[in-house]
Amino acid sequence: MLVGDSLFELVPPHPLEGLKVVNAGFGGATAANVYASIESSVVLSALKANPPARAVIQVGTNDSKVGVDPFAVAEKTMAICSLLRNVGTESVVFAIPPIEEKKTAFRSASVATAINDATRQACLRSGVPFVDPYVAIRGSNDVTEDGIHLARGATLALVDAIRAA
């Protein structure tokens, strides 16, 4: 199960052929939005009735604005993991991708980095695997199309990491 925002929503299905994947990514979602969605009685009941073996969680991109508390985002990510653990689903948390500020005025690269750092530490404390699918492309040019949404190379890195998870 893919849990996150538009970065997961936009993952093309054909590279994931052969995997049973429920894509629960939805555009514009913050960590709090994702938590509220999973916590809803309808979704939680469906998950309890048919729990996925593993959930790949990537949240925080839409939280990466100046003034956002990275530790609150990390805590909400861990709360998502807890909800999923309670239905028998193993979680793997992915880092959010680099933000290219020159292409967007709506997100902050430094806040995104702080969210990743806080989330990595929270995962370490909780024993939840943390993976950075973008480690090989961080610092390169044209990781995104618009400062947030992934360019082709970054999408391929994300798909490879999903397949490996």
Image (spheres, rainbow, N blue to C red):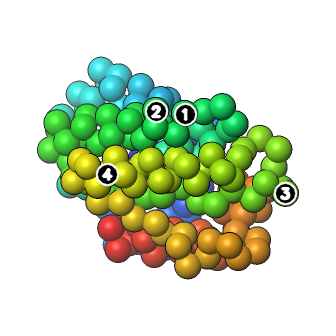
| Alpha carbon separation for disc pair 2 and 4 | 13 Å
| Alpha carbon separation for disc pair 1 and 3 | 22 Å
Q: Does dot 1 land on a helix, a strand or a loop? A: loop
Q: Does dot 2 land on a helix, a strand or a loop? A: helix
Residue 1 visible within the image:
no
Q: Residue at x 54, y 55 (%)?
A: 96
Labels 4 and 1 touching (C-beta < 8 A): no
Mark 3 and mark 2 lie on one chain; the one further toward the N terminus is 2
The spot of residue 18 in percent (x, y) is 34, 72
In-image side of 101 versus 53 (left or right): right
Residue in the foreground of this view, choosing between 46 and 134 = 134
What residue type is disc 4 on?
Answer: Cys
Q: Considering only vertical position in the picture, is 153 above or below 31? A: below
Labels 1 and 2 touching (C-beta < 8 A): yes
How packed mark 3 is, by other alpha carbons closer than 10 Å (few <14, some 14-19, many 20 or more), is few
What residue type is disc 2 on?
Answer: Ala
Q: Dot 2 corresponds to which residue?
A: 72
How packed mark 4 is, by other alpha carbons closer than 10 Å (few <14, some 14-19, many 20 or more), is many
| Alpha carbon separation for disc pair 3 and 2 | 26 Å
Labels 2 and 4 touching (C-beta < 8 A): no
The label shown at residue 69 is 1
| Alpha carbon separation for disc pair 3 and 4 | 30 Å
The label shown at residue 102 is 3
Labels 1 and 3 touching (C-beta < 8 A): no
Mark 2 and mark 4 lie on one chain; the one further toward the N terminus is 2
What residue type is disc 1 on?
Answer: Asp
Q: Residue at x 25, y 34 (%)?
A: 83
| Alpha carbon separation for disc pair 1 and 2 | 5 Å
